[in-house]
Amino acid sequence: MTDDRDRQLLAWLGAGLLAGGLPTQEVEQDLRSVAAVLGHPRAQVACLPRGVWVTLAAGRPTTFEAVEGGVRLDQLSDVSAVLAGMRTGSLGPDDALARLSTLRGQPHRYAVPGVVAGGVLSGVGIALVLAPAWPSVVFAALLAPVTVALMLLSARSSTAATLTPLVAASVSALAAFWAASAGLVDAPLWTLVAPIAVLLPGATIVTGLVELAAGSMVAGTSRLGRGTVQLLLFALGVGAAVSFLHVPLESLDPARPVELGWWAPLLGVAVVTVAISLMESLRLSLVPWVMLTALATYLGQLLGQTLADNRWAGAFAGATVAILVATVVELVRPQLPRSVVFLPSFWLLVPGSFGLISVTQLEVGPEAAFAAVVEVTLVILAIALGVVVGAALALPVRQAARRVGLGHLVGRLRGGRNAS
């Protein structure tokens, strides 16, 4: 019975981590480390984005656990806390199983009003970063509730989830191109992206490339394929709007509107951080740490792009900084795992947003489309490389911290200061 319990625990733990969007190779390593703590050093683990297989030794019974949908960042934080407790021995197997069994049933901390407010703020914040102009910001605030409604609907219906990229892109594009024809907004391509940016599959595509680089060929290929198909559905929605409204080709100019000052993107980072916290049910006490990582990511991206004068250098620098800062935050604040801090940074690295802008150049012509696709491919590859390099640089720090118990030491010192 103990073996059955341990297999179930490992399977549930792996399913929770995979549902949070973590790369399969990292989940496999984490589960093997927990299995060793439980007394199973020869455990074998295999993960795909939609499922995990666990056996405690070759030839022994195997447990499979399907991954049924994603989890919020607050739920991923709880899964990561269970993982950390199992590694250090501070959490027993029975207690870990009990905590994981209630994971899906945890209510959203801010309920539907928080999700709606977060959706509107995310559109505003991303507009300040991507298209810093007041017309684009107002447009994002007005259209973001449509995206939120589609997100809530897709959570209840698989058919709606499949059609959401197409519908969201069509609605936003129709509104943006109509507003541009009326002289209300400039650069409709960048303007239409902000309200739907939370739906774009940038994180999926980059994670797939990271998995491919790590040798997880099946997982990486499937995730990369899914992200690409979603991106094409978004592009199809934009193309449908272009055809319906007979949009002139000059309206598809990929130039960004920049009317506001240097402060606009920084304000956008802060607004996006609050939006993520509301939508993902994060505790308010954790918001400053997520904001710190997001700000460092943006500044790293900006510095790299400025020094090298190209997008891919900024993408590489931003991804590397994001991983390194998230690792430091995890050491200082053990209850806020690195993955929870890092994942929101994909909203600022905007591989999905830039990818959609590039793919829509198919409407302009083959030459423009080819150049745009090459550029976005380099940006996405640079982000994936930055993730790999950042993780490699952070690995010795994490291993050293685990050996000396730095996270627990920081927690004890903080507790001592509070008591005094």
Image (spheres, grey):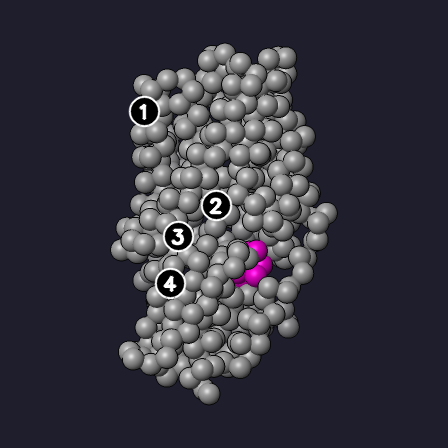
Q: In which quarter of the image is residue 254?
A: top left
* Quarter placement of the C terminus: bottom right
Under mark 3, the amino acid is Leu
Q: How crowded is mark 1: few (under 14 residues within 10 Å), some or many (20 or more)?
A: some
The secondary element bearing badge 3 is classed as: helix
Rendered residue at 53%/56% (across/down): 69
Residue type, mark 2 in image: Ser
Q: Residue at x 57, y 76 (%)?
A: 98
Q: Is residue 330 visible?
A: no
The residue type indicated by label 4 comes to Cys
Dot placed on the residue nearer the N-terminal end, 2 or 4: 4
- According to the picture, the residue beneath numbered tag 3 turns out to be 324
Q: Distance between the residues labelled 3 and 2?
A: 12 Å
Disc 2 and disc 1: Cα gap in Å?
28 Å
Please tell me the numbered disc located at residue 47: 4
Dot 2 alpha-carbon crowd within 10 angstroms: few under 14, some 14 to 19, many 20 or more: many
| Residue at x-position 41% and y-position 28% | 359
Q: Which of marks 1 and 3 is nearer the N terminus?
A: 3
Identity of the amino acid at label 1? Answer: Phe
The quadrant in which residue 269 appears is top right
Q: Mark 1 points at which residue?
A: 370
Residue where numbered disc 2 is placed = 345
Residue 21 is left or right of residue 188, and the answer is left
Residue range (magenta): 72-77
Q: Residue furthest right?
A: 113
The residue most toward the bottom is 1
Whether residue 74 sits left or right of residue 21 in the image: it is right
Res. 239 visible in picture: yes
- Which callout, 1 or 3, points to the residue nearer the camera? 1
Q: Is residue 305 above or below residue 17?
A: above
Q: Circle 1 — which element?
A: helix
> Which badge, 2 or 1, is on the more N-terminal residue?
2
